[in-house]
């Protein structure tokens, strides 16, 4: 039933279209001279067997017509008689004559020239924009501009902005195409004195020295003799001139680095702009605002071409987008680029870039680039780059890089920071230029200033020579150890080890260390890899500095040694605690424990 109804409607529609086409396409002959239009239409009705309907207020029926045709279609005849602004609608054998419905324009244009208010010269590359609709353009080489504006916007006002000129504001009245010429005045800069100024010299006033009474006159005429003290000759010590050694001042170098960073940051952000947007940037256009924007790609969205200068509460980028600032939320399928500040939540499938400051939560599948400060929870699948100060929790699958100071927690295989302040680093490798009350924890940690470093040469009851390097901070540092016995009997040949330690000071010269080091040894046999030798040593050391950089130390130790090599026997050690056979590694092994010692020399860092 439904199919039958649909087929019937289609047939009726086709029939109606065919009838309309057939009625208007029939050809007739017509020859009239100075006849009113209504008489001409009646003549056509008789020849074509049709009936016309029209509104006399719309069509002038008294208009005189002179027209001749030997055989034209009814449609062409009506167009030639009435004009293209009229059309005929067919209803059966009736033709309704009416005005064609042309779509109303939704936009209008404002054009004009921009000139210098003093010289009258045309000004090129002037930013012309409307802050509500974000419509924008630039004036050309002749100072001419053309901007399209929507008719349905209730309030419209154009801004004309150019570097070194005052901003001109022109309110738009009417919603039709119009011409608006504008003059700009140069910005008045405060005058600066270029020549030195001198104080005006005033003549000295002489005081009247005439005596006021007789006593003063006598004292002036007969002054009392003045005793002259004896001149005693004495030898003066000749002081040698002090050597004025130049002081090392790196303030200029750091200032140059900071200046280079700022220029590099600006160059990078400007590189992301188009040529026209760079002109808008130089012209210092106002900060613009829209609560919401959506874009497919940078500059292809509701922020239009002014996107890098617009602040949005919510920003949605289907693939990627570039906006001025974000206040609450930004989501990007691939990348988000924010020229200035991001506050709230920012998430991207691959990349986030923020130019000035980030506050809140920032998530990226690959990398976060914060060219300014970054505070909050910052997480990326690969890398976090922060070129100024940071705080909060920063997590990355490969690298956390923070060039300024950082407060909070960094978690990544590699963490790099300028200055750690009340911070913790958790990673395989941790690096910092300086630390204050901070703790890097990892396989290897290095802090240049206020860190802890020792290079140690020592000997013990087990090893003739031990070399150690310790790096980190006093609260937690790493120990890398190597030992050599030069082929001595009943001792392993050499070994390598790794450990952890902590240190505390009693004074500037005296301190202590608590360390745990695990060593693996190669015994004095040919089958090096068939014998398992492991050594765990716990030590409590006491360090005394001889100079700022050199110290001696001594440490009692508690040792646990396991060996499957029958050639090694520690049962004769004086402070042996225990000896027994174990089967920990699949073979019969000997396990020893004893009290020992370690004594040596340390090269210390300045901190």
Image (spheres, helix red, strand yellow):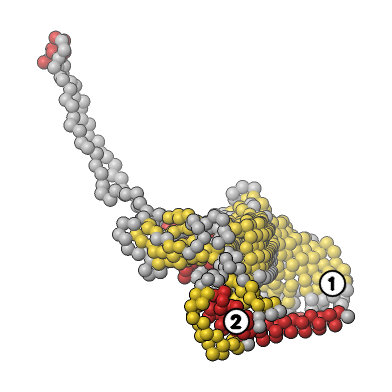
Image-based side of 529 in relation to 57, left or right: right
> Where, quadrant-wise, is the C terminus in this rendering?
bottom right
- Front in this rendered view, residue 500 or 402: 402
- Front in this rendered view, residue 16 or 23: 23
Under circle 2, the secondary element is helix
Q: Residue at x 57, y 74 (%)?
A: 38
**In this view of the protein, can residue 103 be seen by the observer?**
no
Q: Residue at x 64, y 68 (%)?
A: 317
Image-based side of 599 in relation to 233, left or right: right
- Front in this rendered view, residue 275 or 394: 275
Under circle 1, the secondary element is strand
Where does residue 521 sit, x and y in percent of width and height? 73, 74
Q: Residues within 10 Å of mark 2 (few under 14, many from 20)?
A: many
Q: How many marks?
A: 2
Q: Residue at x 87, y 68 (%)?
A: 580
Q: Nearer the viewer, mark 2 or mark 1?
A: 2
Location of residue 361 by image quarter: bottom right
> Where, quadrant-wise, is the N terminus in this rendering?
bottom right
Image-based side of 158 in relation to 99, left or right: left
Point out the residue furthest to the bottom here: 70
- Residue 44's tag is 2
Where does residue 288 sit, x and y in percent of width and height? 54, 57
Disc 1 designates what residue? Answer: 590
Image-based side of 380 in relation to 123, left or right: right
Location of residue 382 by image quarter: bottom right
- Residue 545's tag is none
Where does residue 358 sit, x and y in percent of width and height? 61, 58
Location of residue 430 by image quarter: bottom right
- Front in this rendered view, residue 42 or 316: 42
Where does residue 446 sit, x and y in percent of width and height? 61, 63
* First-in-chain label (2 vs 1): 2
Q: Is residue 17 above or below residue 287?
A: below
């Amino acid at each position: 039933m439904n199919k039958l109804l649909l087929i019937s409607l289609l047939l009726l529609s086709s029939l109606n279209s065919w009838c309309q086409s057939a009625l208007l396409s029939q050809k007739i002959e017509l020859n009239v001279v100075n006849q009113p239009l209504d008489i001409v239409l009646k003549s056509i009705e008789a020849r074509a067997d049709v009936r016309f309907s029209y509104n006399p207020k719309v069509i002038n029926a008294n208009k005189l017509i002179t027209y001749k045709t030997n055989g034209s279609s009814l449609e062409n005849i009506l167009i030639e008689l009435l004009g293209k602004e009229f059309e005929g609608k067919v209803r059966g054998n009736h033709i309704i004559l009416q005005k064609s419905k042309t779509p109303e324009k939704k936009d209008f244009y404002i054009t004009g020239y921009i000139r210098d208010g003093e010289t009258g010269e045309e000004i090129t590359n002037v930013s012309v924009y409307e802050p509500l609709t974000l419509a924008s353009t630039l004036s050309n080489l002749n100072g001419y501009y053309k901007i399209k504006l929507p008719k349905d916007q209730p309030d419209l006002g154009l801004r004309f902005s150019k570097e070194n000129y005052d901003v001109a504001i022109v309110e738009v009245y009417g919603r039709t195409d119009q011409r608006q010429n504008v003059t700009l005045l140069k910005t008045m800069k405060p005058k600066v004195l270029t020549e030195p100024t001198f104080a005006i010299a005033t003549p000295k006033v002489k005081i009247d020295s005439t005596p006021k009474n007789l006593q003063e006159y006598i004292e002036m005429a007969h002054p009392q003799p003045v005793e002259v003290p004896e001149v005693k000759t004495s030898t003066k010590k000749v002081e040698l001139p002090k050597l004025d050694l130049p002081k090392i001042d790196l303030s200029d170098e750091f200032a140059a680095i900071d200046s280079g960073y700022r220029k590099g940051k600006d160059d990078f952000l400007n590189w992301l702009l188009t040529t026209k947007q760079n002109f808008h940037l130089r012209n210092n256009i106002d900060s613009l605002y829209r609560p919401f924007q959506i874009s497919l790609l940078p500059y292809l969205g509701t922020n239009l071409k002014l996107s890098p200068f617009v602040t949005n509460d919510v920003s949605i980028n289907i693939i990627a987008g570039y906006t001025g600032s974000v206040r609450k939320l930004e989501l990007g399928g691939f990348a988000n680029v924010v020229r200035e500040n991001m506050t709230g939540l920012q998430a991207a499938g691959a990349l986030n870039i923020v130019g000035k400051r980030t506050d809140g939560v920032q998530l990226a599948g690959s990398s976060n680039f914060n060219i300014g400060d970054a505070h909050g929870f910052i997480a990326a699948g690969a890398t976090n780059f922060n070129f100024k100060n940071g705080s909060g929790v920063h997590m990355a699958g490969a690298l956390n890089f923070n060039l300024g100071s950082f407060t909070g927690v960094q978690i990544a295989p590699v963490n790099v920071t300028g200055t750690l302040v009340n911070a913790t680093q958790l990673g395989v490798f941790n690096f910092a230029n300086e630390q204050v009350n901070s703790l890097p924890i990892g396989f290897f940690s290095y802090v240049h200033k206020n860190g802890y470093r020792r290079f140690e040469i020592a000997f013990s009851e087990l090893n003739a020579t031990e070399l150690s390097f310790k790096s980190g901070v006093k609260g937690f540092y790493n120990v890398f150890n190597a030992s050599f016995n030069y082929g001595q009997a009943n001792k392993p040949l050499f070994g390598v080890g790794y450990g952890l330690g902590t240190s505390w000071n009693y004074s500037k010269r005296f301190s202590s260390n608590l360390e745990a080091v695990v060593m693996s040894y190669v015994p004095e046999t040919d089958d090096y890899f068939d014998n398992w030798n492991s050594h765990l040593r716990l030590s409590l050391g006491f360090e005394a500095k001889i100079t700022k950089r050199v110290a001696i130390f001594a440490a009692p130790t508690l040792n646990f040694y396991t060996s499957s090599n029958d050639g090694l026997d520690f049962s004769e050690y004086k402070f042996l605690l225990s000896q027994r056979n174990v089967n920990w590694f699949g073979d019969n092994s000997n396990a020893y424990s004893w009290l020992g010692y370690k004594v040596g020399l340390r090269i210390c860092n300045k901190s």
